[in-house]
Image (cartoon, grey):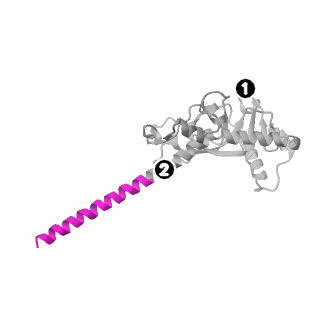
């Protein structure tokens, strides 16, 4: 593994052409994943699940996410390395449950239905999101998806009434207990796939630590050089007294 210095270009925001993701937008995941660290093939085998490697090899369907939290822009960080929080969306719509809600194509604006994995919110680098697609979800739908997540995490005491779900045009399934194992297997597979987005984030944090470590070494070396220079000056001064 080595630092990919060729990709570490820091530039001013006004010169950046990267679109800033906005909450509620649906984005297509980039099929060519970017990371501040380059991994050897052996390292990729260890870091990425087989499902993630299949996607990176172009052997699986396109993937989509909903933007949960837009990145905080900074003059000190290139926009491609900004971290965005997203909710995974699946094109496999056979796994509707009380926490996997169906978003019909007429709502998403895509040519297919999507499954919103309300339980599955992860960080990703902005550069690994290709482009916004379809229609931006309404604030009501966005809020409801996050409320479902909060409810099942015990953060809120109750869900909105069923009629509100129907009014929003979403579909859930509160009788999924008979397919519990199937849903659990689906969730595990989705967690495995999410290596595509989470491994580059981990690599970014590792890069930041390496930069801090390198800076600390440089500071120590500079201090040592100054101390040695000071010692030489003392000796020279003492010799000529």
User: x%, y% of residue 173?
Assistant: 85, 41
Q: Nearer the viewer, residue 11 or 164?
A: 11
Cα gap from disc 1 to disc 2, whole angstroms: 40 Å
User: x%, y% of residue 52?
Assistant: 64, 36
Which residue position holds label 1? 111
Secondary element under disc 2, as helix, strand or loop, is helix
> What residue is shown at x 75% (from left), y 36% (from top)?
115
Please tell me the numbered disc located at residue 209: none
| Magenta stretch holds residue 127 | no
Q: Earlier in the sequence, mark 1 or mark 2?
A: 1
Residue most toward the bottom?
241
> What residue is shown at x 63% (from left), y 32% (from top)?
55
**Residues drawn in magenta:** 212-241
| Magenta stretch holds residue 234 | yes
> What residue is shown at x 48% (from left), y 46% (from top)?
77
Please tell me the numbered disc located at residue 208: 2
Instruction: Please say whether residue 19 is visible from this viewpoint.
Output: no
Q: Nearer the viewer, residue 159 or 57?
A: 57
User: x%, y% of residue 17?
Assistant: 50, 35
User: x%, y% of residue 46?
Assistant: 59, 41
Locate the C terminus and report the quarter of the image it occupies.
Answer: bottom left
Query: Could you classify mark 1 by the number of other residues whose Cα lies within 10 Å: few (under 14), some (14-19), or many (20 or more)?
Result: few
Instruction: Please say whether residue 209 is visible from this viewpoint.
Output: yes
Q: Residue 140's image quarter?
A: top right
Q: Nearer the viewer, residue 206 or 93?
A: 206
Secondary element under disc 1, as helix, strand or loop, is loop
Residue most toward the left?
240
């Amino acid at each position: 593994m080595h630092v990919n210095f060729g990709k570490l270009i820091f530039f001013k925001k006004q010169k950046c052409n990267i679109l800033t993701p906005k909450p509620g937008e649906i984005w297509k995941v980039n099929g060519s994943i970017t990371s501040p660290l380059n991994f050897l093939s052996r390292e990729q085998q260890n870091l990425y699940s087989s499902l993630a490697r299949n996607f990176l090899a172009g052997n699986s369907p396109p993937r989509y996410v909903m933007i949960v939290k837009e990145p905080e822009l900074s003059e000190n960080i290139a926009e491609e390395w900004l971290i965005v929080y997203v909710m995974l969306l699946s094109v496999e719509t056979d796994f509707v449950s009380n926490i996997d809600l169906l978003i019909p194509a007429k709502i998403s604006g895509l040519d297919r239905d999507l499954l919103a994995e309300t339980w599955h919110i992860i960080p990703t680098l902005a550069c690994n999101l290709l482009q916004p697609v379809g229609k931006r979800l309404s604030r009501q739908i966005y809020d409801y998806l996050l409320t479902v997540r909060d409810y099942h995490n015990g953060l809120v005491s109750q869900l909105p009434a069923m009629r509100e779900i129907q009014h929003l045009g979403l579909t859930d399934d509160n009788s999924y207990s008979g397919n519990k194992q199937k849903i659990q297997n689906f969730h595990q597979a989705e967690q495995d796939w999410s290596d595509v987005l989470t491994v580059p984030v981990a690599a970014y944090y590792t890069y930041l630590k390496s930069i801090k470590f390198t800076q600390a070494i440089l500071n120590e070396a500079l201090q040592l050089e100054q101390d040695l220079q000071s010692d030489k000056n003392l000796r020279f001064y003492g010799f000529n007294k």
